[in-house]
Image: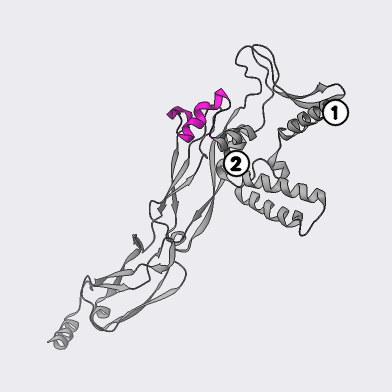
Amino acid sequence: MRTNVLLVLVIIISLFRNALSDLYADMGLKEDATDSEIKKAFRVLSRKLHPDHNPSADARDEYAKVQKAYGILGDRKKKKVYDMMGEDGLKELDSGRNQRHQHMDIFGGLFGGGGQDQTRGQDVHLSLKVSLADMYNGNDHTLNFKKSKLRSKQVVKDCMSCKAKPPQLKKVQIAPGFVVQQQVAPSCDHVCNAGTKQVVKGHSQLLEVMIEQGIPEGHEIKFEMEADEYPDRLPGDLIFKVKSAPHPYFKRVKNDLHMKMKISLLEALVGFHKVIDHLDGRKVDVERDTVTPPGYQMILKEEGMPKHNVPSEHGNLIIKFEIVFPERISPQQAAQVRSLLA
């Protein structure tokens, strides 16, 4: 009798361990929570439930749930797999093995085990035009990207053949006197569509794109598995190619900035002092006290773009001067110029 009771207890523990959990609910979030909302919730809950601040047993259990939830939702790839396939999909992702036939090709493509190209959706390539000032200073952009998305909850939809409903929680007697709840899937002798997920087209997905200081022209920012979603494959990547919008006077060439500056004939002969507004709002002095020949180039060291990943270092600012000649001068002015330059 004692052996039977122990066996029943082991079965019960196993069933509860395998029960479905809602990681978003564990963190008090909605399923469309952004990355920043997930991080913020984790910081708040970690402080509130940490054993050093809240030693109660309930808080300890909740803290463990939050840690587990953030370990998945805070990882873009794991979050995507969880959203599409639940915790079963995460188990397959972690092990690299295929436990169910319908997911075999999908994970085979990820781990190099016999997957076909059609098991993964197409990558989506988009251009992201930002200001040159954003490339110089760095900035965060929030983009609204529309895509096809699977509903994360199962849709109650009858199977057209057997009229079965999606998997439901039912009470099941596993031993005399012991009743537990577990999911019961529809019983069919064919491929049953009951409870399949629906594709929602035109779903608005908010993405936070970080433009780093000195980010190169044409640099690609990749969001793994954020392209269109479909029931039978993993989504492709969403890839933004960063391009700079035209600037009124600066032109970027790798880490250098180029610009043209017009000066009068008088300034070309006797010198000048001018001030330009830089991309970070600073005033930069440009001056000469001698003759400036046509096409002359002035190089201001360390006044160009910050170098990507090393923003303390900069390229140069190269200024090419264009001399503006007067359209005409009077005979008296011509005589004065001759006498001065003779």
Segment tinted magenta in the rendering:
96-122
- The circle drawn on residue 291 is none
| Circle 2: element type | helix
Q: Which amino acid does the dot numbered 1 rest on?
A: Arg
Q: Which residue is mark 2?
A: 79
Quarter-wise, where is residue 295 in the image?
A: bottom left
Q: Is residue 244 magenta?
A: no
Q: As displayed, is residue 70 above or below residue 106?
A: below
- 213 lies left or right of 29: left
Image coordinates for residue 90, horizontal then vertical, percent: 60, 36
Q: Which amino acid does the dot numbered 2 rest on?
A: Lys
Quarter-wise, where is residue 4 in the image?
A: top right
Q: Earlier in the sequence, mark 2 or mark 1?
A: 1
Whole-number angstrom distance, CA of label 2 to CA of label 1:
43 Å
The residue at 37%/71% (across/down) is 302
* Residue 132 appears in the rendering: yes
